[in-house]
Amino acid sequence: MKRIALISTGGTIEKTYDELSGVLANNISVLDVMLASLELRGIAITRVQLMNKDSLDMSPADHTLIAETAIRMASDYAGVVVVHGTDRLAVSGHRIVELAPTPKSPIVFTGAMRPYALRSTDALQNLTEALLAVQLLSPGVYVAMHNQVLQFPGVTKDKGLGTFVKEPA
Amino acid sequence: MKRIALISTGGTIEKTYDELSGVLANNISVLDVMLASLELRGIAITRVQLMNKDSLDMSPADHTLIAETAIRMASDYAGVVVVHGTDRLAVSGHRIVELAPTPKSPIVFTGAMRPYALRSTDALQNLTEALLAVQLLSPGVYVAMHNQVLQFPGVTKDKGLGTFVKEPA
Amino acid sequence: MKRIALISTGGTIEKTYDELSGVLANNISVLDVMLASLELRGIAITRVQLMNKDSLDMSPADHTLIAETAIRMASDYAGVVVVHGTDRLAVSGHRIVELAPTPKSPIVFTGAMRPYALRSTDALQNLTEALLAVQLLSPGVYVAMHNQVLQFPGVTKDKGLGTFVKEPA
Amino acid sequence: MKRIALISTGGTIEKTYDELSGVLANNISVLDVMLASLELRGIAITRVQLMNKDSLDMSPADHTLIAETAIRMASDYAGVVVVHGTDRLAVSGHRIVELAPTPKSPIVFTGAMRPYALRSTDALQNLTEALLAVQLLSPGVYVAMHNQVLQFPGVTKDKGLGTFVKEPA
């Protein structure tokens, strides 16, 4: 049984709909609902709810806190998954690479372009991929999303494509 | 085979999610998707896409246009269903009562508190109810939503309850 | 607040999937899950789990028990909804008409061609319709399904069409 | 862009519901619907519909055909995913190991305990995992399911657990 840490920070993946205002907000964690809908054999997950922010609202201190928490847990667990808003996901990813170029176990970021609350969500796909990739990859920092695993550094969000891409070297 | 007119005007029920801005907007009609997911025996539906507005953006002329269209189609069809944003739904409903206290066939408004795009939508329930109620009610103006049929005049949205209620006489 | 009795007897609508045998069976009532997914304003439901049978397995005594229970509850409630397997639904419906041509309040049968457990189910649509129709109809015995309300006697399942039809008089 | 071959053979994952008989059967491929619901960046999939059988109905010749097709495509593609009924999945997997202990690229089997047609399906999770694992694994024969990757030989279905396990060596 592999021990995996799952750090949640908020982002689109966890947004829920507020009837009164008609907008999507980061109010309640839906990660537990998503995890309950998956069959997870062979891993034991430790949940860490570090913060619950749209990543556009994250400060440099937030990114550093996320990076330090992930690095620390990578020493204690067989792998770390970080659920993160996609807009500033790469900032947290690169912060880890600066602080710890080679973490003790793989750190895999994921997120979503469309909240779990939507029928057409990509949240379950991406969480599924991150939880599998973290078991198969060698130590390093990655994003897993849309059936693609990309390794930091040099990863950026392509807003036009709505996904992550590797910057040309 | 009963001939039913279905007038769409926009509102939460038809809102879709825009990945780039992260908000829900009235861009594309999803009524056809909803209709395709229901089994509708015994009625033939004529679709009229009159406008596609959040009802908070409707002008008095919009409400009058909706009312006049519904009244006119009530003369030609066995019933009329109007899909409408809930915030100003009662304004259009009362406008019909002013212009035509007794339409030729039942006119049933419906809408949704949570868009069809959401897993937890009430859109399908409400559309199902309106399409059935319009076959069973006597001529008049109504809202069908949340397993409840209320007759105009005297109907108002209770924002706290998130549903329609009958005003005390 | 209208008081409605909801009698469940089993049938396709409540079938669940057994992983081991790979078949759909009447094991667990899913009516509570369906009811929780609807917004029901203005009615108070009393649940009666009378039996849990595929209607093909119902005996004449079963049909009589269903009919007598529905008739008795029609005297105490503003309406009665009966969830029933579609294959023998009409047998129970006609049994009521024999025993009580005019019940005290409307008795509305419903069921499903495709279990709630399936994505493409018609169960939620049909339950929604029965719960609304029972509030709008005059006393009598009906089936509500597929956006259609038919009154007993003279109702039969058309297996080819996969729905209920009215027999020619 | 990685070129991946996707061989379908039938099994629970593709079963659909037959209203008339009330059973789940292997009639129509639903793999295309599943693929359309995923965002697949970075891979190009070639579909091969080899057969459409409940694996309990597979003959030794069927297992050999599946094995030979997978081995041949492993030479031409960056990876091969095989969708297969779980009951005899391990027979096809071991047949590959007998015929080609080291295929040219990874061959990843997957399947489902509950058809895609069910709300509670594990089909999308398992397909997502197989399509990601095939990009990350070294050449060999595997099953990816329930957030777990197991390598042949020595893999067996545990009917009690409802998943695959590694036999003690």
Image: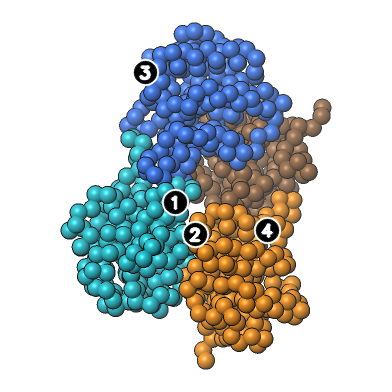
Chain colours: A brown, B orange, C cyan, D blue
Do labels 4 and 1 touch, CB within 8 Å? no
Residue D168: which numbered mark, if any? Answer: 3
Above or below: residue B64 compared with residue C133: below
Residue extending farthest right: A169
Do labels 2 and 1 touch, CB within 8 Å? yes
- From the image, state whether disc 4 or disc 1 is nearer to you: 1
Q: Which residue is mark 2?
A: B41
Closer-to-camera residue (D169/D41): D41
As helix, strand or loop, the secondary structure at mark 4 comes to: loop
Q: Which residue is mark 4?
A: B29
Mark before the other along the chain sequence, 2 or 4: 4
Q: Are marks 3 and 2 on the same chain?
A: no
Name the residue type under label 2: Arg
Residue extending farthest bottom: B169
Q: Residue at x 53, y 72 (%)?
A: B134
Q: Which residue is mark 1?
A: C161
